[in-house]
């Protein structure tokens, strides 16, 4: 099941949560793989959106400057 916040355009996060975002990305990829293996196309599709949002969030937070604590990433 996708985390609703990751598909919400108002979702905001910070670099302190990068470990959780990486863990959620890995879990989401496993869900996609299992859904595809069992023919659950809609579940795979919904979770691909979550994975794409996580990729954007992780990329934005990875490029955050260490001294820039106020920068946040969103899913849009």
Image (spheres, rainbow, N blue to C red):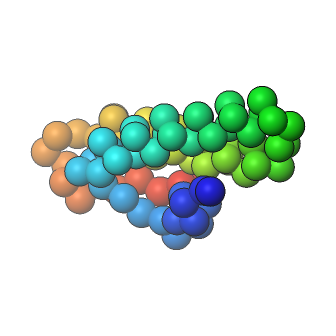
Location of the N terminus (image quadrant): bottom right
Quadrant of the rendered image containing residue 60 = top left
How far across and down, in percent of the image, does residue 15 sit? 27, 48
Tell whether 61 sits left or right of 45: left
Query: Relative to 5, is 26 above or below?
Result: above
Whether residue 43 is visible, yes or no, is yes
Quadrant of the rendered image containing residue 52 = top right
* Front-most of residues 49 and 39: 39
Q: Residue at x 23, y 50 (%)?
A: 16
Query: Relative to 28, is 73 above or below?
Result: below
Report the number of numbered marks: 0
Tell whether 24 sits left or right of 69: right
How far across and down, in percent of the image, does residue 27 sit? 51, 40
Q: Residue at x 40, y 40 (%)?
A: 23
Whether residue 52 is visible, yes or no, is no
Extreme residue in the bottom direction: 10
Tell whether 7 sits left or right of 11: right
Quadrant of the rendered image containing residue 58 = top left
Q: Residue at x 42, y 63 (%)?
A: 12
Query: Relative to 74, is 65 above or below?
Result: above
* Front-most of residues 67 and 20: 20
How far across and down, in percent of the image, does residue 73 sit? 41, 53
């Amino acid at each position: 099941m996708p985390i609703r916040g990751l598909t919400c355009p108002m979702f905001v996060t910070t670099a302190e949560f990068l470990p959780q975002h990486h863990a959620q990305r890995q879990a989401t990829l496993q869900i996609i793989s299992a859904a595809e293996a069992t023919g659950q196309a809609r579940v795979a599709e919904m979770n691909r959106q979550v994975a794409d949002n996580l990729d954007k969030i992780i990329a934005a937070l990875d490029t955050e400057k260490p001294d820039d604590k106020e920068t946040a990433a969103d899913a849009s």
